[in-house]
């Protein structure tokens, strides 16, 4: 996890149980087992009008429908994508201080990402997440981004 990203804030955004003593290793284990669908729903609610596009970047609509019917968790791969989204959301809130500005940053094309949306870049790969986190770090520390 990126140095500027607070693991506990990510866990909170995802609505994971507070009573567990989370470590990076236990969080990794939870990702491997698959996060609950409620974690997706929580972040989806924060994204408002962008939630449909966001959800399709995490899991396909038919798969999500099936998982909801069977009350199954997300797969490990889907959970990884979701935690990457939660990481950049958490850092964007930390940088911008409010949800509207964080959301605007995450959903508008960015020139340093070849005109791609930061949220989409972050969800796609770990390297993409690092690229978005680097931009947010530059913004937080007052260097050009």
Image (tube, rainbow, N blue to C red):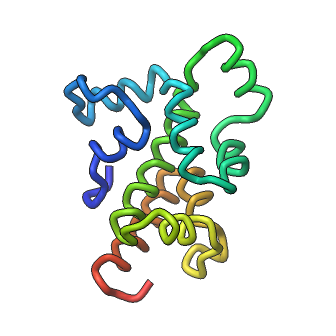
Q: In which quarter of the image is residue 22?
A: top left
Identify the image quadrant of residue 56.
Answer: top right
Q: Residue at x 39, y 25 (%)?
A: 30
Q: Which residue is drawn at 58% across and 60% down?
A: 121
Question: Does 14 sit left or right of 44 as displayed?
Answer: left
Residue positioned most to the left: 21
Residue at 68% x, 35% y is 59
Left or right for 11, reference 88: left
Farthest-out residue, bottom: 144
Q: Relative to 17, is 108 on the left or the right? A: right
**Vertical comparison of 52 with 65: above or below:** below
- How far across and down, in percent of the image, does residue 92 sit? 42, 64
Q: Is residue 85 left or right of residue 56?
A: left
Residue 108, image x, y percentages: 63, 72
Looking at the image, the residue that sits furthest to the right is 62
Q: How many marks?
A: 0
In the picture shown, does residue 124 fall above or below 137? above
Instruction: Name the spot of residue 83 as percent of width and height, x first.
Output: 46, 42
Farthest residue in the top direction?
Answer: 70
Image quarter of the C terminus? bottom left
Front residue of 11 and 3: 11
Closest to the observer, 106 or 97: 97
**Residue 48, image x and y in percent?**
63, 53
Which residue is rendered at x = 69% and y = 56% of the image? 49
């Amino acid at each position: 996890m990126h140095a500027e990203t607070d693991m506990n804030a990510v866990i909170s955004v995802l609505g994971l149980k507070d009573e567990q003593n989370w470590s990076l290793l236990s969080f990794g284990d939870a990702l491997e087992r698959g996060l609950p669908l409620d974690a997706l729903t929580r972040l989806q609610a924060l994204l408002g009008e962008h939630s449909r596009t966001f959800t399709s970047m995490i899991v396909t609509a038919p798969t999500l429908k099936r998982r909801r019917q069977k009350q199954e968790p997300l797969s490990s791969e889907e959970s990884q994508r979701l935690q990457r989204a939660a990481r950049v959301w958490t850092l964007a809130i930390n940088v911008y201080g409010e949800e509207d500005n964080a959301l605007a940053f995450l959903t508008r094309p960015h020139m340093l990402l070849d005109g791609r949306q930061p949220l989409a870049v972050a969800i796609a790969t770990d390297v993409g997440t690092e690229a978005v986190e680097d931009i947010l770090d530059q913004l937080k520390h007052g260097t050009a981004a």
